[in-house]
Image: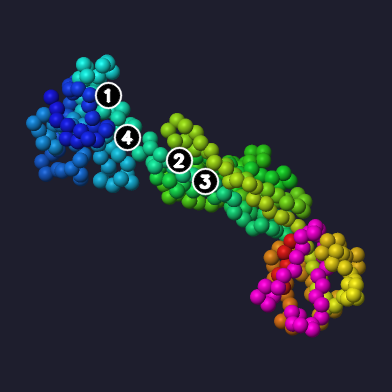
Amino acid sequence: MSTSFFPEIPFAQADGSYTNPGGSEPAFSLDVGSYYHNANVVMVSAQGTPPGQDDIWMNGHMDNDPANGKVSYLGGHKYTVDVPISANPMTQGTRYFLNALFEAPCSESDGQPEVSTSISGPASTSTDTYTTSVCYENTGSGIAFDAVLTLTLPAGATFVSATEPGQESGDTVTWSLGSLPPDTSECIQVTVTFGAEGSYGFTSTLSYYTGLNQHQVDSGAPEIVSYGHVNLLRYAGVTQIAPQLPPNVAIFVNRYPVDPALDSARDLEVADFESGQTFPNDTADLLAGSATLVFYELEGDSGSTLRADKVNGRIVLSY
């Protein structure tokens, strides 16, 4: 016979009487001076005995800390699976065991991992060697097992190196991450070279298991990186105002065919210009009545997206 201390708890409920099949460990008792961390650890014990003496079915958090997961102990040996349960008392142990599995946090929606991956890096580069960061995290309360992170390289990009233990194969770089516990967050790096000026899109995927089920998430729309050289020339003035010569369409879309002689007193060439870079200037250049500033694209091709903006008293160019 047995005593159930918490019959209101679903995974501790029985359907009929319970019989212990015996075995080498039919029950558990605490040593003198020992105690349980929590009073609700013991679910079932031998009839007429208090918790800590001849305990049959126990379930609790390791060190009384929910973050450490649950541990279950069931006394007895070789429980049966005969039905109906109410007529087979030794089947109750099997019921307790299965209930413990379904009661575990990993079997519930709020005990699942929340996994994501993303790409992070500069939006443009003026050199053909580029490093991007591949990030992953688990913000859920469950563990993502056997996680594998994959970065897909864009066409025209050649692999150079990756954070260990990244393995390159064809157009992908893969990391076997193992298990991702809750509150895991990390970014790892990949360096590539671009074969030609243009736009390149990076994507990543992260596959993982919960139990026997495999899941996969991705980084979403490709993270676009623009690669190109834009060398700019600044000089004070245009040849004609009304109509303006050269016209903006020639300045901001096409390569200007003539390279005027540089005047060191007023002209400045910026090599390997990067999008968003602040263009050197004097404060007087931005005042009313100052000479017109013209920016010529001498090398590279920004298409029709080259723009000049005044930001905090400086000229910022982007493409």
**Which numbered disc, 4 or 3, marks the residue that appears first in the sequence?**
4
Q: CA distance from mark 3 to mark 1?
A: 38 Å
Between marks 3 and 2 in the image, the one whose residue lies nearer the viewer: 3
Residue 119 drawn at (x, y percent) = 59, 50
Mark 3–mark 1 contact, CB under 8 Å? no
User: Quick check: 151 above or below 250?
Assistant: above
Q: CA distance from mark 3 to mark 2?
A: 11 Å
Comparing 78 with 13, the one in front is: 13
- Asked if residue 119 lies left or right of residue 53, the reply is right
Q: Quadrant of residue 284?
A: bottom right
Name the kind of residue labelled 4 in the image.
Answer: Glu
Identify the residue shown where x is 76% and y is 57%. Answer: 228
Identify the residue shown where x is 64% and y is 58%. Answer: 122
Quick one: label 4, few (<14), some, or many (20+) residues within 10 Å? some
Quadrant (top left, top right, bottom left, bottom right) of the N terminus: top left
Residue 116: give its label. Answer: 3
Between marks 1 and 4 in the image, the one whose residue lies nearer the viewer: 4
**Which numbered disc, 1 or 4, marks the residue that appears first in the sequence?**
1
Between marks 2 and 1 in the image, the one whose residue lies nearer the viewer: 1
Quick one: label 1, few (<14), some, or many (20+) residues within 10 Å? some
Q: CA distance from mark 4 to mark 3?
A: 26 Å
Query: Residue 27 lies in magenta, yes or no?
Result: no
Query: Residue 304 lies in magenta, yes or no?
Result: yes
